[in-house]
Amino acid sequence: MRPISLSVCLAGVLLGAALLVAACNAGPAVTPPILPGTSADPREVVIIAKDYLFIPAVLDLVPGETVILQVVNGGLVIHEAVVGPMPVQDAWEAAEAATADAPPGPTPRVSVPPDLAGPRIVVTSGERRDAAWTVPASAPRDRGGWFVGCHIPGHWAQGMVVPVRFVGPDGVPLAATDAGTGGTLQAPVRAG
């Protein structure tokens, strides 16, 4: 048996490393086809809140579908998942900021105007809460994109925000219908 030369071995290692680097830089994973939920048969969407991030890193939703948002707190502190465009995120951030200096004890109740509410699910450490919700069919047209954010004081600033990507049932991201949005997957931009 003939020994493998060092140059052949090195070439194999370099090729393997190049393939690995290419795979890592391929961008976000492609969304598999989605069977959109209906009011009679909602699709389960799991959101895991940890200290201080959400899993998945991008939430895929089909406009008009009904989902059961299953929010699981895998962290040690209280978290919330607020789903909506930036005006909704800004409203909850302002409402929660008022509780930043609250004394120890139960979390103070906060609210926002109904037109800015959006779904909000609060979970304590180790808890799971479910909420049924129908994704607005018009959501992809909202300027600035949609997000899942945690507005417990300081959590958003620590990175507890992920974008919502609106997709068709085939899993292909939808093109923005409003030329001002630049697409349905956005980075959060705070007003003011």
Image: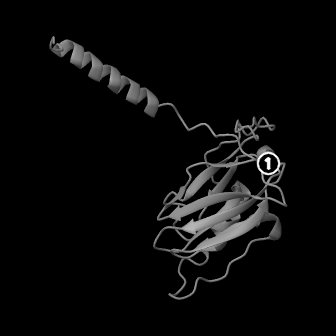
- Residue name at image x 22 percent, y 18 percent: 9
Residue 32 place in picture, x, y as percent: 65, 40
- Would you place residue 139 above or below residue 73 in this image? above
Q: How many labels does the image show?
A: 1
Q: Which amino acid does label 1 sit on?
A: Pro
Location of residue 19 (image quadrant) = top left
**Which x, y percent locates residue 53?**
51, 59
| Residue located at (78% from left, 62% from top) | 133
Quadrant (top left, top right, bottom left, bottom right) of the C terminus: bottom right
Q: Is mark 1 on a helix, strand or loop?
A: loop
- Displayed quadrant of residue 41: bottom right
Res 79 quadrant in image: bottom right
Residue topped by disc 1: 63
Residue furthest to the front? 1
Disc 1 crowd, CA 10 A, few/some/many (<14, 14-19, 20+)? some
Q: Where is residue 78 in the image (x, y as percent from the top left)?
A: 53, 74
Q: Nearer the viewer, residue 6 or 180?
A: 6
Which residue appears at 67% of the width and 82% of the height?
109
Viewer-closest of 51 and 16: 16
| Residue at the spot 50% in from the left edge and 87% down from the top edge | 104
Is residue 127 visible to the viewer in this orientation of the structure? Answer: yes
Q: What sort of colour scheme is used for the picture?
A: one colour
Residue 143 in percent (x, y) is at: 75, 46
The answer to whether residue 134 is left or right of residue 92 is right
Q: In the rendered view of the protein, which quadrant contains the N terminus?
A: top left
Q: Relative to 46, is 98 above or below?
A: below
Asked if one can make out residue 192 in the rendered structure from this viewpoint, the answer is no
